[in-house]
Every structure is written in C-alpha cells, then in structure tokens.
C-alpha cells in the first residue's frame, strides 16, 4: 500500500494543533527506561482493581519520513507526537519511545470503553497536529494498538501484543485503536444459511408487528381493557407525521439553494478517490476513469483509483497503460483490503488536493463537477454532496424503478431535508470534502454505511455539510430484485447501526441547532420506528373488525377516518409529482416510468422497504453483519483472475 507525506505549506492552519518545539517539553522516555518505570508504577499500585493498559502508537508515514529526513528526522517527529500524547496523561501514567518509530504508553487501570475513548482522543490530537519540519508543516496518520495487563505485569510483553494490534490498525487507517485479543479460532458455523435466516427474520417481523399486537389487543379487550381506539389514533398520528414531513420536503425542494458565486482566482489542487473492488467493477472501471480524465477543471486534478482484488486481472494491464499515458491518474492497489472504507483511507495517504471527492467505481461525474463543488467549499462548506442519477434505467423494470426512486431521494428528499434540517448527508459517492476534514474523519469499515456514519461524526464535530441538487454524477442501478434486496438490506442495517451510535449524541449535542436536532431525530429515530408503526395498522384494523362483529359492521364513513386516510394516501402521488418536476432531464422525459413507479410503490415496493428495515434491525440486534457486494453487469471473461 503506497503512502506519502502530507505537507501543509507555509504557516500551520489556525484550526489545527501547533506543536511546541520538543526542547520546551518533557522528553519521552526510551523503551528500556519506560519498561522499568512502568513495572515500578504498576507494582506500587497492585491494589488497583483495574488492570493497567499498554498502548503502542506508530505513524503510517514512518517509511516516507525516514526516507526523506533520515532516522533522526523520523525519531524527532515521533518524539514530538509522543510529547503531544504525554500532555493527555494523568499521574502514574507514562509515555516513551521504542527507538524504531513506535510510541509506548502506560495507562492506569480503567474499563475497556474508557481506555478506547482516551486512546481515540490521543489519536485525534496527533492527527490534527501540524509538525514543523524544514520549513514545512507535516501531517501524519497515527495508528494504535493496545493490550490490557494480567498478573504478573510484564511491560515489554504487553508492548509486543499491542504492536500486533497496531499492525491490524495499519490495515484500516481509520483513527481507531485496535485491542489485542487471544484468538479463539474460527467461529462455529451457523446452522442456517444466510437466505434461510433472512426469511425467518422477515417472518419474525410479521409475528412481532402483526400477530402479537392483534393477540394482545384481543387479550386486553377480553380482560376489560379496550385500547383499540388509542392505538388506532397513535398509528394515525404516526402516518400523519410522516405524510407531513413528505409534503414539507417536497415543497422546500421546489426552491433549491442558489449556487454560490465563483470565488475567482486560481482553482486549488483537487483529488478524486475512486474506490473499487476490481473483480466487480472490471467491465466498467476503464470507462469510469475516462470520464474523470475528461473533467473540465482548471486547477491541478489528481485521480486516485484505490482498489483491491483477490488476484491479478487482465484489466490491470489496461489501467497501467492509462496511468502511464496520463500522470493525473494514480493506481493504488490496497493489499489485504476487504472494504471500501479501507480503500478510501489508504488513498488519503497519497491525495494531494486541497479538496477530495469520493466516488464509487461506476460513477461518471458531470464535466463541471469539480468546478461546481469548489464554489460551495470556497463559500465555507466542509462537505458538499451531489445528486446521483441512474444511467442504466432503460435496461429493465428494476433499474427503471430505482432510477425514479433515486430522483425522489436526491432531487426531492435530500434537497428538502437540507433546507429543513440545515445539514446535508454524505451519500458515499459524489461527495466532495475538504481534504483535512476527510483526514480527520476517515471512513470506519466496521459500519455497514460508513458514509452516513461519517456524516454524523462530521456534523457532531461542528462541520458544515451542504447539498447541491445540480452537482450531477451518473451511476448504475441494480438490475435484479435479488441484488436490490441485498443492497437495501445493507443500507437499512447500516442506518440502524448509525442510529444506535449517534442518536443520543446528536440530541444531547450543544453544538447542534434545534433544527439540526429535529433532523437527527427524524433521520435516526423516527425513520427506524416508523416501519413498525406503519405495520400496526393491520392488527389494529383486524381488531376493530373483530370487535365490531365483521367487516360489514364497521363504519367506514367516519369523516376523521376518511380525511386522514386521504391525506396520508396523497403523500405517495405527491412525492412522485415532486420527483417528476425536479428530476434530472434524462429521467424526467420518461413519464411512463413515474406512473409505473407510483403503481409499484403502492402495490409492494413501499412495504418491501419497510420489511427490509424491520428485518435489518433484527439482523443488527442478533449480531449478524454480513453483506453482499452489489454486482455490476459484466461479461464473465472480463472478471477472470490471471494465473501463472
């Protein structure tokens, strides 16, 4: 995996940590001295109920630092980083260096969660620092592993274990510490296949959301407690709230934000990171790269293809020829990568742009994409998300449905929500970041939707995220229901992960406005509860019919019921109308697609997505976190592995 030093020219940035010269700070202890002092401290605190912790920090750019500045230069930067970490240590804690580019830290006994939180704070402190060196300000990427002690305490043995964990962290570069754990071997195989588990979980949601509530209503009624009306009103209010939000989003989307004025002056260097799992993208990646090389951007443009592959592929020869012909193209094969997040984080070691765009490997951005994005970033935004348009809608019914759905998401919902909630969402592709913000945030591969997770981590850090419906990029949609099901299952489970991780923090955050908190509550709270509330209409209506003595005995002409039903039902056609009005031109001209989408949404697609959301929640709660790569259409010959 390639790496390169990040250099901030001139003075250090005002929002970054400025490193005090080492001569004015406490000098970290060398390895042997650190180990002796650590063991003495631990012996003096043997009555502590918590096991002490040893952490090892290294710099991902260590090889480049040594090549450029020599071993003495590397050790100087390492000592400066160790001193920054030392500022965060309490009494009876130590920091030292191992003489080989590593930083050793002893933390007094604490819980695993507290240790992880403190180590993250140390990682972020070093990551945000500008290290003055030879007239430049260097930026480095810290990696960290840690291990907890047993009895007897052996400092160097724990340091060796932490070093093993540190090497695992090197493969992710996500600014998260990794804990050393004794391997327990392969996990026991599951008794049911993934497909069988999914169907069982889907049926379980029906039992939990329909059968159980109906039986509970009947049991309570038989015991003298009739709660049918209150439950019905609760479901009704839930449907009305969702419909109101849909109408509000659509109406606000009719007035998109104006594009900021051109800031003038020279355009800064820009980078594009294209993350690819190459066997899946082999048939499309060359066309994708050619579309990027056609970008109309007046400043320096670097295009980084960060990819992983299980073995050599024929297309790699074509890619190498393209890179040789155009120096703007950088090929970065990320060894041992298993995720998009790892590919993106690895690419951050080589990007040179002041701002960086992230794209999936099937995206073709509009020729003016980088020009347009820079206007938002120059206006003060930290992240700008663009409008993703489906470019293969004519290949089949599923792709046509997704093409219209994407317009309802990107042309209507994203635009309206950004106006209502005062923040945009990074959607994983066609998103443009200030490079320093992206380096501080990273993608975290343990999250199934690392894009949404990075959105809320960025928002909670006080950054500004905006959405531009005119910033276009065209991508491929799944072409089969099976592929669509797997894709949406991963998205739904990923959203639920993000909800569990960030909802509480967002609602408590002193840095978010009331509107932003309302938006977080809607996106992370309400959207997870609603699929269950909407399902309750079936057991409630079944109970009311049972209580009345039959379907013919129920009064269906109650004005409140009729009016609220009409208002709720109107949200679907209204959304499609807003979508048609605001869609990208190549989608908008296919009017039949919108009528078909309305029909299929009412018939099954809306409930299919709700079913996926409920099933995904059960998967997450049960600890099942496997996901399936969304396939791209490709001839078999294009994706064969080379041998020999």
Image (cartoon, rainbow, N blue to C red):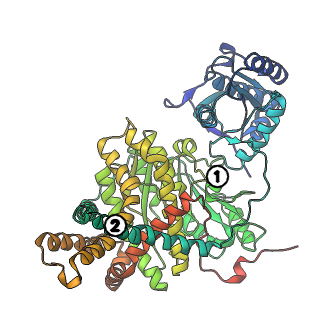
Q: Indicate whether 307 appears above or below 49.
A: below
Structural crowding at the residue carrying mark 2, measured as other residues with C-alpha within 10 Å and reported as few (<14), some (14–19) or many (≥20): few
Name the one closer to the observer, 545 or 144. 545
Residue under pointer 2 = 219
Image coordinates of residue 171 in percent, x first then y, are 71, 50
Q: Indicate whether 359 appears above or below 554.
A: above
The image quarter in which residue 483 lies: bottom right
Among numbered discs 2 and 1, the one appearing first in the sequence: 2
Image coordinates of residue 448 in percent, x first then y, are 56, 58
Q: Nearer the viewer, mark 2 or mark 1?
A: 2
Residue under pointer 1 = 347
Q: Indicate whether 29 appears above or below 221.
A: above
Mark 1, secondary structure of its residue = helix
Farthest residue, direction front = 223
Farthest residue, direction top = 24
Residue 266 can be seen, yes or no:
no
Name the one closer to the observer, 582 or 109. 109
Q: Is residue 327 left or right of residue 214?
A: right
Residue 169 can be seen, yes or no:
yes
Farthest residue, direction right = 644
Structural crowding at the residue carrying mark 1, measured as other residues with C-alpha within 10 Å and reported as few (<14), some (14–19) or many (≥20): many
């Amino acid at each position: 995996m390639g790496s390169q030093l990040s250099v901030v020219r001139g003075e250090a940035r005002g929002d970054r940590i400025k490193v005090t010269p080492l001569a004015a700070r406490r000098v970290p202890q060398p390895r042997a001295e650190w180990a002796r002092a650590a063991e003495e401290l631990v012996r003096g605190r043997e009555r502590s109920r918590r096991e002490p912790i040893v952490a090892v920090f290294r710099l991902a750019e260590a090889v480049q630092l040594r090549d450029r500045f020599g071993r003495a230069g590397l050790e100087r930067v390492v000592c400066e980083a160790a001193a920054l970490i030392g500022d965060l240590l309490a009494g009876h804690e130590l920091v030292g260096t191992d003489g080989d580019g590593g930083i050793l830290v002893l933390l007094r006994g604490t819980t695993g969660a507290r240790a992880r939180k403190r180590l993250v704070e140390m990682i972020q402190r070093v990551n945000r620092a500008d290290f003055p060196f030879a007239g430049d300000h260097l930026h480095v990427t810290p990696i960290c592993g840690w291990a907890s002690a047993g009895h007897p305490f052996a400092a160097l043995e724990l340091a060796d274990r932490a070093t093993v964990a540190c090497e695992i962290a090197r493969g992710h570069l996500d600014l998260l510490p990794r804990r050393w754990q004794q391997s327990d071997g392969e996990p026991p195989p599951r008794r049911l296949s993934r497909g069988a588990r999914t169907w069982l979980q889907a049926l379980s949601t029906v039992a939990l959301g329909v059968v159980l509530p109906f039986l509970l209503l009947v049991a309570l009624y038989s015991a003298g407690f009739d709660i049918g009306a209150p439950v019905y009103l609760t479901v009704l209010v839930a449907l009305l709230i969702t419909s109101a939000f849909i109408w509000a989003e659509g109406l606000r989307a009719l007035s998109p934000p104006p594009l900021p004025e051109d800031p003038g002056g020279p355009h800064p260097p820009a980078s594009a990171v294209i993350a690819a799992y190459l066997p899946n993208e082999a048939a499309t990646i060359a066309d994708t790269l050619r579309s990027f090389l056609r970008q109309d951007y007046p400043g320096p443009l670097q295009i980084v293809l960060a990819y992983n592959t299980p073995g050599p592929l024929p297309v790699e020869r074509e890619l190498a020829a393209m890179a040789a012909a155009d120096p703007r193209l950088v090929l970065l094969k990320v060894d041992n990568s298993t995720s998009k997040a790892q590919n993106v984080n690895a690419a951050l070691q080589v990007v040179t742009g002041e701002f960086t765009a992230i794209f999936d490997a099937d995206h073709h951005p509009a020729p003016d994409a980088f020009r347009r994005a820079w206007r938002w970033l120059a206006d003060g935004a930290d992240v700008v998300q663009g409008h993703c348009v489906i470019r293969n809608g004519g290949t089949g019914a599923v792709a046509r449905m997704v093409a219209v759905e994407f317009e309802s998401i990107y042309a209507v919902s994203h635009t309206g929500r950004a106006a209502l909630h005062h923040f945009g969402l990074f959607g994983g592709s066609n998103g443009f970041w200030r490079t320093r913000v992206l380096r501080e945030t990273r993608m975290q591969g343990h999250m199934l939707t690392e894009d949404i997770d990075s959105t809320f981590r960025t928002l909670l850090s006080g950054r500004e995220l905006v959405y531009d419906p005119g910033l276009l990029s065209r991508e491929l949609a799944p072409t089969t229901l099976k592929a669509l099901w797997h894709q949406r299952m991963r998205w739904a489970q990923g959203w639920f992960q993000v909800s569990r991780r960030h909802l509480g923090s967002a609602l408590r955050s002193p840095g978010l406005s009331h509107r932003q908190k309302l938006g977080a509550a809607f996106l992370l709270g309400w959207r997870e509860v609603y699929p269950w509330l909407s399902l309750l209409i079936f057991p409630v209506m079944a109970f009311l019919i049972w209580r009345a003595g039959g379907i013919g005995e129920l009064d269906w002409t109650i004005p409140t019921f009729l009016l609220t039903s009409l208002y709720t039902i109107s949200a679907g056609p209204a959304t499609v109308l807003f979508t048609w009005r605001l869609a990208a031109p190549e989608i908008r001209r296919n009017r039949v697609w919108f009528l078909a989408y309305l029909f299929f949404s009412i018939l099954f697609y809306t409930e299919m997505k709700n079913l996926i959301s409920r099933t995904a929640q059960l998967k997450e709660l049960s600890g099942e976190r496997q996901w399936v790569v969304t396939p791209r259409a490709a001839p078999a010959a294009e994706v064969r592995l080379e041998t020999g």
